[in-house]
Image (cartoon, helix red, strand yellow):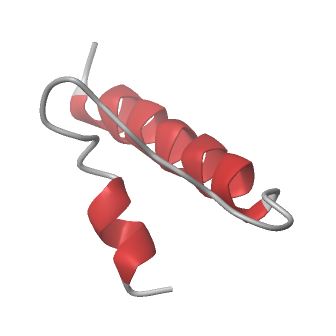
Amino acid sequence: MDEADLEDVYNTERHLLYVACTRARDRLMISCVELGSEFLDDLKAV
């Protein structure tokens, strides 16, 4: 896997998380056992 493929995977994962979070109507709760996704930092600014 080269750098461009890896970037595409990250962009897809980031997009899927954003879409899932923005579909919440009343509340959104995100929990984890270990460290959360690095993509959650992107959502804090929204």
Q: Quadrant of the N terminus?
A: top left
**Who's the residue at 30% across and 31% down the image?**
32
Is 31 left, or right, of 22 in this rendering?
Answer: left
**Who's the residue at 86% across and 65% down the image?**
25
Tell me if residue 8 comes above or below residue 45 in the rendering.
Answer: above
**Who's the residue at 60% across and 51% down the image?**
15
Tell me if residue 29 comes above or below residue 5 in the rendering.
Answer: below
Q: Nearer the viewer, residue 10 or 21?
A: 21
Give the residue furthest to the top.
1
Q: Position of residue 22 (x, y in %)?
A: 73, 64
Tell me if residue 36 comes above or below residue 42 in the rendering.
Answer: above
Is 15 left, or right, of 22 in this rendering?
Answer: left
Total residue callouts: 0
Q: Position of residue 40 (x, y in %)?
A: 35, 57
Q: Nearer the viewer, residue 40 or 4?
A: 40
Tell me if residue 9 comes above or below residue 40 in the rendering.
Answer: above
**Who's the residue at 28% across and 66% down the image?**
41
Is 35 left, or right, of 39 in this rendering?
Answer: left
Q: Nearer the viewer, residue 3 or 28?
A: 28
Give the residue furthest to the bottom.
45
Q: Position of residue 8 (x, y in %)?
A: 47, 38
Is 46 left, or right, of 7 in this rendering?
Answer: right
> In the rendered image, which quarter is residue 28 located in?
bottom right
Give the residue furthest to the left.
35
